[in-house]
Amino acid sequence: MSRGLKWKISTVLLGVALVVYYFSLPATLFTDPYSTVLESARGDLLSAAIAPDGQWRFPETDTVPEKFTVALMAYEDKRFRSHPGVDVLSLGRAFRQNLAARRVVSGGSTLTMQVIRLARKGEGRTVGEKLIEIILATRLEWRHSKDAILALYASHAPFGGNVVGIDAACWRYFGRDARSLSWSEAALLAVLPNAPALIHPGRNRAQLKAKRDWLLEKLRDQGHIDAFTCQLAQEEPIPEEPLPLPRNARHLLARMQQEGLAGHTLRSTLDQHVQQRVEQIIQDHHQRLLGNQIHHGAAIVAEVATGRVLAYVGNVSNTRNYRGDDVDVARAPRSTGSILKPFLFAASLEEGKILPGTLLPDIPIFINGFTPKNFSKDYDGAVAADRALIRSLNVPAVNLLRNYRYEKFHTLLKDLGMTTLQHPPDHYGLSLILGGAEGTLWDITGMYASLARTLNRYFTLAGANKYILQDIHPLTYRLASVDTTAVAGEASSVLDAASIYQTFDALKEVYRPGEESGWRYFNSAKKIAWKTGTSFGFRDGWAVGVTPDYVVGVWVGNADGEGRPGLTGTDAAAPVMFDIFSQLPGNRWFARPEAEMTRITVCAKSGYRNSPLCDEVATRWVHSRGLQTGACPLHRRVHLSGDRKYRVHSNCEPVDRMVDVNWFVLPPAQEYYFRPHNVSYRSLPPFRKDCQPSSAVVAMDLIYPKPGARIYIPRDLNGQLGDAVFELAHRNPQSTVFWHLDGEYLGSTQRHHHLTVRPGQGKHILTIMDESGDMLEQRFEVLSKM
């Protein structure tokens, strides 16, 4: 073979060897599964989940503590910073030791070679394997910096039991992160990967301590620590057994795993101190609620400005017995109860359908079988809209929704961020405002925060455009930059500042439970706009509160839907919410958006815009669209006799002898329920006997059945046909009322106008007449006998 051919073959072989060498190191050294690690916004460990292979192996770190680095190189590889991945002197020394002992007593491996051995787990300690480690170690040095190689070692070295990597080891053995290692702890971790079985609880303690103390003395001799530091470090005890990792925000950790983020270190928006305090508050109240067999609760705390979540408690930790406390009820759809009423109130204000004090009817209603009732089972007859919101009355809310339209309200809720409305509006109907739909604590807390954010933003934007639609957004638990700068944007929002302000202004007056009831008497007390909700059957208790800075949402109940007596938003959830607010700083309140509001006079009794007939007026700030509302329709000019005892008219009394008076007059049905609650209310005087009643004022009204009603007649428990109870309201309690059904006389009633009727199936005409000759006729239909 010629010399030229030999040279070419050698060149090709060398090229092949270089290519093989270049590609010999896998692109990814370690394919092990990692634990999922949840951190706070400041990097504090909140919780972690074990890796799928049962190891506590945190994701790779890129920072190795300086003390650990010094101790590790002193113990394992003192020339690490200078060699190319292989230390020839160490290999020579190991060869001589092994030859003298006639067995392997030293491997002479550098830290770089140990990284390769960790990556090639399961390979035997043979000469051939050692050569592979040498080759791959030099290739690793070519690819990575010394610090990166140290980080790979620290992330994958075994530290005893199922603990892998320095981060997991620090938490398991010392209960804190690697940033605050002492010299004693750094020396202990440096010797452990060389003999990880020594950390086993209950054995080898003396041997492990001896190895650590020897390394500390070596560090002293090398000048890394002084004698006093060495002595103190040697006095530190060896960990007795692995410690449990923190378990804060465990439901958020599980949520992020389910969202495909498992195996990573997840930096959240949570504040560690707020999270821990909220968890403790939930647990404290859990002990109280357990007495009523209420087993679960959830809470969310978030910043209004950014929507960043500061505390996320998906459920309590039931230490007595497991009752489904792994269920994240903060994301579970639950009946909303009354928690959505503020959004309807604000929407009605914005459209100019009501003013804050407008009287709404609060009487029994029957709508195609839907018969909403107030929580107290009582009726006020008529109640101011803001008072109805404060007291969370159901019937006025249903009447308000009928006026606003449930189809529009359905769209509004979706626009505000309610993601659980999976059915069309007709599926929910008017029950939408009373818990007929399900919502999650996550969504609803975010919706309240969006309203507060919109109101806050109003004062930071200049010019005509005062809103940006991006202010309506869900809460976030992922730490990312949030743009909070004020920039002009859309000219409108889902709800505007004036309607939100008036809603919050009303909600801050909601009666607070327990010790919070006297909050108005303390200057330092927080003003909180808050609302509760209680679902049908006492299954869910809600409380959501908001300030300009924070929003707090609380849910209490049983995850399986079991109802409990007394499980209400006010009694069960609100005390938790107020305890959480007591831990949050600040005491600001929302500024009034006067540019969108107008100061007008309103009728003090009806809450409508003032009319010339109103005898008592008040001045109030209202939404500018409130000017669209009409003047008070409940005040009338009535003509009385000279002694003011009777109503008269020009057919029976000379005009010059009449006394004209402005009178506050409610419809008969409303008056029937209003009068017992308002002793100052004066019913219209009766007509004088010689005067025929004027048709201008209705004397009576049917409470049930309503015009065109379609009703069912129930059966009794014994299977016999039951009865329907018809009810009438009359202005004059002393009047006698005569009842007729399809022309047949049924009977008469006085004072309390209730009549038991058993109509047959089909269409009927109910005719009612009082002793003054006023007559009322109502048509209804009996569909069937149930």
Image (spheres, rainbow, N blue to C red):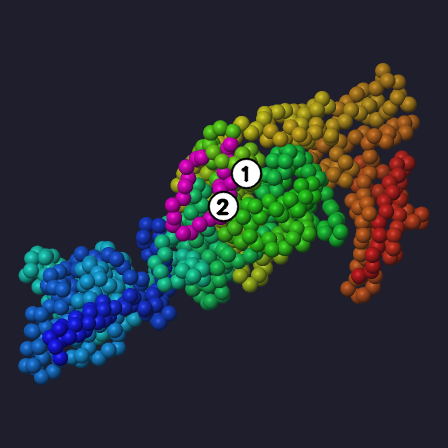
What whole-number distance in Å separates the C-alpha atoms at marks 1 and 2?
Answer: 12 Å
Quickly name the residue at label 2. 473
> Callout 1: 10 Å neighbours few (<14), some, many (20+)?
some
Helix, strand or loop under label 2: loop
Residue in front for this viewpoint, 403 or 174: 403
Residue at screen point 40% across, 60% down = 261
Q: Magenta segment: does it hold 780?
A: no
In this rendering, does residue 273 appear at all? no
Residue at screen point 32% across, 68% down = 31
Measuring from the top left, give residue 305's x and y in whole percent.
44, 41
In this rendering, does residue 565 appear at all? yes
The residue segment tinted magenta is 465-487
Q: Is residue 660 left or right of residue 20?
A: right
Find residue 768 and report its image quarter. Answer: top right
Helix, strand or loop under label 1: loop
- Farthest residue in the top direction? 656
598 shown above or below 569: above
Residue in front for this viewpoint, 210 or 728: 210
Quadrant in the picture for the C terminus: bottom right
Quick one: label 1 or label 2, which is nearer the N terminus?
2
Residue in front for this viewpoint, 282 or 251: 251
Measuring from the top left, give residue 657's x and y in whole percent.
85, 17
Measuring from the top left, give residue 5's x and y in whole percent.
15, 75
Residue at screen point 58% across, 62% down = 562
Three-letter code for the amino acid on which mark 1 is drawn: Ser
Quickly name the residue at label 1. 493
